[in-house]
Amino acid sequence: MQPLYDKALSRGVASLTDGELLTLLVGDPELAAAVLRACGGSLAALAAEEPARLRMTGGLGRSRALQLLAAAEFGRRVAESRADETDVIATSDDVVRLFRPRLEHLAHEECWVLYLTSSNRIVERQRVSQGGVQGTVVDHRLIVKRALELLATQLIMIHNHPSGAAEPSAQDRALTDKIARAAALFDIRLLDHLIISREGDYSFLREGLL
């Protein structure tokens, strides 16, 4: 373990591989390797594990499992805190960075709207609906009503897919079209609709659908 400590201290923890980082947390390189293999080599998959399931992985135990999950949650909250400091949107990637820490780990769907000025400055971030694993109900009238109250001229919609696949459903496409048309009646532009999942993200703008 000493060479690992020396590497972390001299080069920073960011220099550690995933396996080395886990070793630093659990104190056993063989156990860290077993846990990483069980999670398909993905730290994101590890962070999404239930405590009861994770504790059985490679004989990890309750204390170490909770320690890993606490470290994952700490990182998520740091990322969310940094994202919350963003006040101007330049690209769709900015939106993904802003909302991934908030939405990626959820087991249910949520839909959010960014209300923007004409210069892409954020006026408000609002969760407009929360649903189940397979969907959520969004009222396009309330979204446009709030934009008018805020004098926002642009919108970006964001929602997550807990299932893992970011591809839009037929309902997602229909909702996007409905909100774009309703907003346009008041000279408000829907800039993008982004879907965030553990496997990636989907942008209606990037795919030429807006």
Image: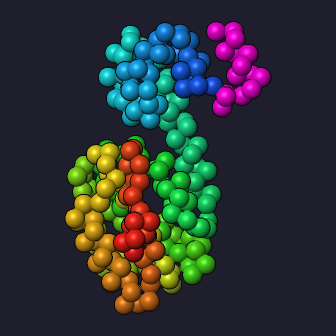
Query: How many callouts does the rendering have?
Result: 0
Depicted 59 relative to depicted 198: above or below: above
Q: Position of residue 57 (x, y in %)?
A: 36, 16
Please indicate whether residue 142 sits to the left or right of residue 23 in the image: left
Query: Does the stretch in magenta take in 109?
Result: no
Q: Which quarter of the rendered picture does the N terminus lie within?
A: top right
Query: In the image, what residue occupies the spot 28% across and 45% down?
Result: 163
**Residue 76 visible here:** yes
Residue farthest right in this picture = 10
Q: Is residue 192 above or below residue 55?
A: below
Residue that appears at 41% across and 54% down: 201
Camera-nearest residue between 53 and 36: 36
Which of the 4 image quarters holds residue 34? top left
Is residue 10 within the magenta segment? yes
Range of magenta residues: 1-15
Quadrant hosting residue 206: bottom left
Q: Report if residue 142 is visible in the image.
A: no
The answer to whether 76 is drawn above or below residue 23 in the figure is: below
113 or 199: which is nearer to us? Answer: 199
Q: As displayed, is residue 154 above or below residue 60?
A: below
Give 74 or 19, whichever is nearer the viewer: 19
Residue 194, given in percent of the width and then of the height, sits at: 41, 62
Q: Quadrant location of the C terminus?
A: bottom left
Which residue is found at the position 39% from the left and 66% from the top?
207
Q: Residue furthest front?
A: 208
Picture residue at 40% right of the left edge, 33% below the top: 45
Q: Main secondary structure of the magenta part?
A: helix
